[in-house]
Amino acid sequence: MDDAEGARVTALAESLMRRIAATGPLTVADYMAECLLHPDHGYYSTRDPFGVQGDFTTAPEISQMFGELAGLCLAGAWLDQGRPPAVTLAEPGPGRGTLMADILRATRGVPGFHDAVRVHLVEASATLRARQRETLARHEVSWADSLDDLPEAPLFLIANEFFDALPIRQFVRDPAGWRERVVGLVDGALGFGLAPPAPQAALAHRLADTRPGDIVEICPAAAPAMAAIAGRIARHGGAAVIVDYGGWHSLGDTLQALSRHGRADPLAAPGLADLTAHVDFEALARAAPGVAVGPLIPQGLWLERLGIKVRAQTLARGLTGAALDAHVAAHRRLTHPDEMGTLFKCLALHPIHTPLPPGFA
Ligand code: SAH
């Protein structure tokens, strides 16, 4: 952490502590939103966090194969649906723009696809938008603030590690209801506390499978995002592929901070560490009425069914030495159960009565 970063953490931590002293504790979601997207001090607002030099790396940054195969999946779904003209190709949370660049490169040979698609990126960070503009300089791209702003048209969408960045609220089951986990002041520093017990209508369905002391998380921004995606697919056609780490029907505290590729204390350096939570894919599926939702499958299986083995062998032919070793390691990292292969899951949405997108059947 250099001096400028130290000054920044002090500024965001101090401003949060002043706010808490004046108006009371923050929900975990409010805290996460400030840490990630505060216009001056937010994690994504102030930096490009990806890669070896950054705090974490993502599948498209590990290997071009991820975006290439994702592109073939989306273009395959477009072909299966009769090659509709004038469709949206969208990605929320595109990071450096690498995934979309790989998708576009891999689908150049699909006749008619590039003429049909208009690329729309949904990105909250001005810093990362600038980075995406550089990566995708050769393509015509529009940016939107919200999935609600996407055109009313067939929608072919991929989201990789987008939903895990959306703020979550946490609730602890209590004999008298639910107590929300909050961020308050403890001995003059940021600390976790619990709000008084209250009923939570949104958690009524979790009374049967939880006991006092259990923590349940909800992601308030996920349902409107899913409604925007599913609504377009139901009305106009298309397909969505959501890739993230998490599970079905999640339970427990999954809030985590990452800094320099290691776990950090989520309250220690607001704005300087990435904050994420596991994605509850069941909650995403429940928020997508009117469309078919495919089975939740591991990332490794999806990539294998899309042909990563053959693609990896083709790419390996041009490589030797350290570059070949890195390529083999990247293939393993994306697919192996000990790495990202089973931790990351894939979920597909598609119109009722259309085939599952490639890789899901
Ligand atoms: N998909 C990319 C990056 C994932 S990191 C990859 O796989 O490499 C999360 C991304 O979501 C970043 O681009 C971040 O700025 C963006 N983001 C976070 N919250 C957002 C929000 N509420 N709306 C739009 N974009 C958001």
Image (tube, rainbow, N blue to C red):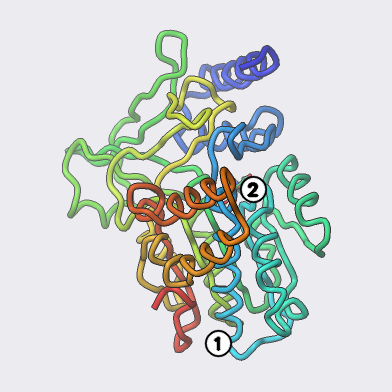
Query: x%, y% of residue 114?
Result: 74, 76
The tag earlier along the polypeptide, 2 or 1, is 1
Outermost top residue:
187
Location of residue 213 by image quarter: top left
Left or right position of 199 against 292: left
Q: What numbered label is drawn on residue 80?
A: 1
120 displayed left or right of 305: right
Against 306, residue 196 (above or below) is above
Tell whether 55 sits left or right of 282: right
- Please state which of residues 170 and 43 is positioned toward the viewer in this rendering: 43
Q: Which residue is mark 2?
A: 95
Q: Position of residue 83 (x, y in %)?
A: 65, 87
The structure residue drawn at horizontal position 45% and vertical position 27%, both measured from the top left corner, is: 266
In front of the other: 325 or 6: 325
Q: Which residue is pictured at 82% across the width and 64% down the height?
A: 140
Q: Amino acid at mark 2?
A: Gly
Ligand 1 within 8 A of label 1's CB? no
**Would you say the beta carbon of the disc 2 residue lies within 8 angstroms of ligand 1?**
yes
Q: Is residue 334 above or below residue 198?
A: below
> Badge 2, how many Cα within 10 Å: few under 14, some, many 20+?
many
Residue 52, picture quadrant: top right
**In the rendering, at what x and y percent does residue 11 appear?**
64, 17
Measure the alpha-carbon separation of dots 2 and 1: 29 Å
Residue 201 location, x and y as percent?
33, 52
Q: Is residue 296 above or below residue 45?
A: below
Residue drawn 59% across the image and 16% down it: 14
Does dot 2 land on a helix, a strand or a loop? loop
**Split into 4 quadrants, where in the image is the N terminus?**
top right
> Residue lying furthest front in this view?
320
